[in-house]
Amino acid sequence: MIFSMKRRVDPGKRAAGRSAVEMVEDGMVVGLGTGSTVFFAMERLAERIEGGLSITGIPTSYQAENRARTLGIPLATLQDHPSPDIAIDGADLVDSHKRLIKGRGGALTREKCVAHAAERLVIVVDQGKCAQKLAGVVPIEVLPFAVLPVLRCIEDLGAQPVLREGSVRDGPVITDNGNFILDCTFPAIKDPEKLEIILDATPGVISSGLFTRFTGKTVVIVGKADGSGAFNL
């Protein structure tokens, strides 16, 4: 086993993750997001693979890669398959227009690359992640060289940015791409599309956790809190 697979089982997350896998068909290339809800999808994928399903996974992080390998899911890269059939991923918050805030797991840039490349994006969440409007913490991956200038730009937008630090050791969290993450608290986000454009155009910003460009191909699957099933948003 490459890593510890111990985790708290959340019935809503489990229902959403497992339900999403029923959209996967034989021969598909599947983007694999990072996070606890997607792990339940990976477990279900592994079960279906044991039953004869043939798929190839594209992991969005080292964590997702290690989990998939442990479960026996065949893997490749976005270079091997630049147009995945489907991507299954989680979200920190989903609004009524299927716009997302992502990045709590630190893989927002690779997740955005896979989401952009995939023909369909399936977002799996529990009911607590659904909201009428986006607000709160928006993670931003930033080049270490430009952290302070980016901090000031974010403050000028009315947000409170904080450099994400590790819980196991001192110092900033380092992404799989070798960058830092700023967790930026916005009291309200009146125009998520405009804010995403502004953030992504800021020199030093690699990618923001706002995902507003994929709503036309996004399916949101919400797991019921009691784990009894899931429904589409």
Image: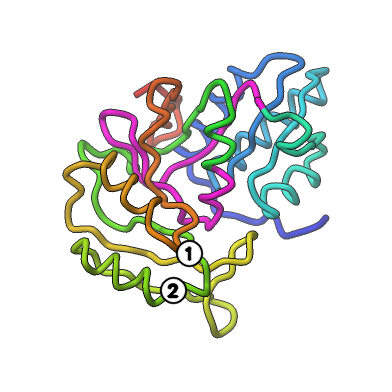
Check if mark 2's residue and mark 1's residue have beta carbons within 8 Å.
yes
Residues packed near mark 1 inside 10 Å, few (<14), some (14 to 19) or many (20 plus) = many
Q: Residue at x 80, y 20 (%)?
A: 54
Q: Provide residue 162's location: percent of width, then percent of height.
A: 36, 73
The foreground one among 44 and 133 is: 133
The numbered dot on residue 147 is 2
- Where the N terminus falls, by quadrant? bottom right
Q: With 130 as the anchor, is 84 left or right in this view? A: right
214 to 150, vertically: above or below: above
Q: Which residue is mark 1?
A: 142
Q: Provide residue 18's location: percent of width, then percent of height.
A: 58, 29
Type of the residue with mark 2: Val
35 to 169, vertically: above or below: above
Q: Which residues are magenta?
A: 83-111
- Where the C terminus falls, by quadrant? top left
The residue tagged with tag 2: helix, strand or loop? helix
Q: Magenta span has 101?
A: yes
Q: Residue at x 54, y 82 (%)?
A: 171
Mark 2 vs mark 1, CA separation in Å: 6 Å
Q: Residue at x 58, y 17 (%)?
A: 23
206 to 168, vertically: above or below: above
Q: Provide residue 216's location: percent of width, then percent of height.
A: 39, 21
Type of the residue with mark 1: Val
Q: With 186 as the anchor, is 181 left or right in this view? A: right
Question: Outermost residue, top direction?
Answer: 26
The numbered dot on residue 113 is none
Quarter of the image holding residue 134? Answer: top left
